[in-house]
Image (spheres, grey):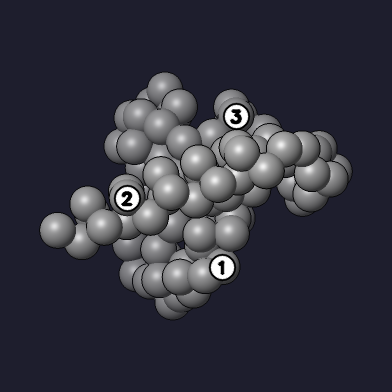
Amino acid sequence: MKQTLATTALAAALGLALGMGTTQAQQPGGKPMNAQQEAVMKWMTQNHLVKCYGINARAKNDCAEGAHSCVGQASIDRDPASFVAVPQGQCEKIAGGSSQPRRT
């Protein structure tokens, strides 16, 4: 139920973002964010979630830092550049979780 609600909320946010057109938001590296990345960041902010890198299952990530364009595109489990949104303070409690992306 919880995951269904989160998935529905994310899908709604993505739909709204895609319908709004292009914006100038940027990723930490200075690259412009695509609409899907912006929607994920807005959803995370509204729900008080933070990025937790290196804990995803293959194709079950929320987004990434430069590795691919965004949701569900991680090609490996525990991708050090892909993140999953988690409640604040929880990432460090998960084995292998990091608040910063790791490059391989």
Left or right for 97, reference 22: left
The answer to whether residue 83 shows anywhere in this view is: no
Nearer to us: label 2 or label 1: 2
Write the residue at 50% across / 41% down: 15
Q: Quadrant of residue 78?
A: top left
Q: Where 91 sits versus 15, above or below?
A: below
- Residue 20 at what x, y percent from top left? 67, 43
Residue toward you, 104 or 41? 41
* Number of residue marks: 3
Query: What residue does disc 3 label?
Result: 69
Q: Measure how far apart labels 3 and 2 are at the Cα level.
A: 20 Å
- Residue 72 at what x, y percent from top left? 41, 32
Q: Measure how far apart labels 3 and 1 are at the Cα level.
A: 19 Å
**Label of residue 45 in the image:** 1
Please tell me how crowded label 1 is: few (under 14), some (14-19), or many (20+) other residues with Cα within 10 Å. few
Write the residue at 77% across / 37% down: 22
- Residue 42 at what x, y percent from top left? 59, 59
Query: What residue does disc 2 label?
Result: 8
